[in-house]
Amino acid sequence: MTGISRSRLGRASWIVFAALACGGRTTAPGKGEVGPNAVRIVPAAEAIALETTGPPLADTSVIFTTGELRTIVLRHGPPENIVFAELTFPPTAFADSGNRVQVDIKPRPGLYGMDIRISQPLRERAFLVFKYGRYFLAPARARAVYGGDVQFERALAIGQVLPDAQLGLLPSTRPAFDNLRAAITTGGGYLVAAAQ
């Protein structure tokens, strides 16, 4: 490869990287944009949600002061109390620090999913991590479509529930084995799913 080609490739790679890294502000779902940077919008009927066999989770409500790092940990019920999900708010998540904010979380029964209500709008992204190692349950439809649990697991992403029966599959990473993480910019419904 010539020096010119390398230079062009380097610039092109940097532009692609910058475009992916810069999420920018997004509006709330239903106003024309999906946050942050949804890779794919699919009809909810064509998405296959990851199910859970674990003990049900209780609804959770947390009040904290903005301007500090806060992680809310949700656990399956007794006897094992295994972590189901974590929701992390960086110190800069809200516009003003020192204010009280309330976060209400309602898990979706039988699914790796939840509805989140945040009393103040987010200025910066929060991070949602689902941990599904112990109670992973692929629906029969997932096995038929993907051919097995491993293939279904590889296709999973965190989806944001949108109006008009749509699901925005968010860019999702795997910070650890059997963990799925995505940045969120608003409250609402979220679930682990794969497109059919």
Image: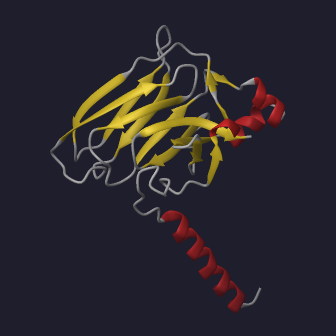
Depth check: 25 or 21 in front?
25
Residue 96: percent from left, percent from top: 19, 52
Residue 116: percent from left, percent from top: 40, 34
The N terminus: image quadrant: bottom right
Camera sees residue 192: yes
Q: Quadrant of residue 65?
A: top left
Vertically, is 140 above or below 164? above
Vertically, is 37 above or below 148? below
Q: Quadrant of residue 131?
A: top right
Direction left: furthest residue: 98
Horizontal arrangement in the rendering, residue 121 relative to residue 2 (left or right):
left
Camera sees residue 173: no
Residue at the image position 22 percent from the left and 44 percent from the top: 66
Residue at the image position 44 percent from the left and 55 percent from the top: 31
Vertically, is 66 above or below 38? above
Horizontal arrangement in the rendering, residue 18 relative to residue 194 (left or right):
left
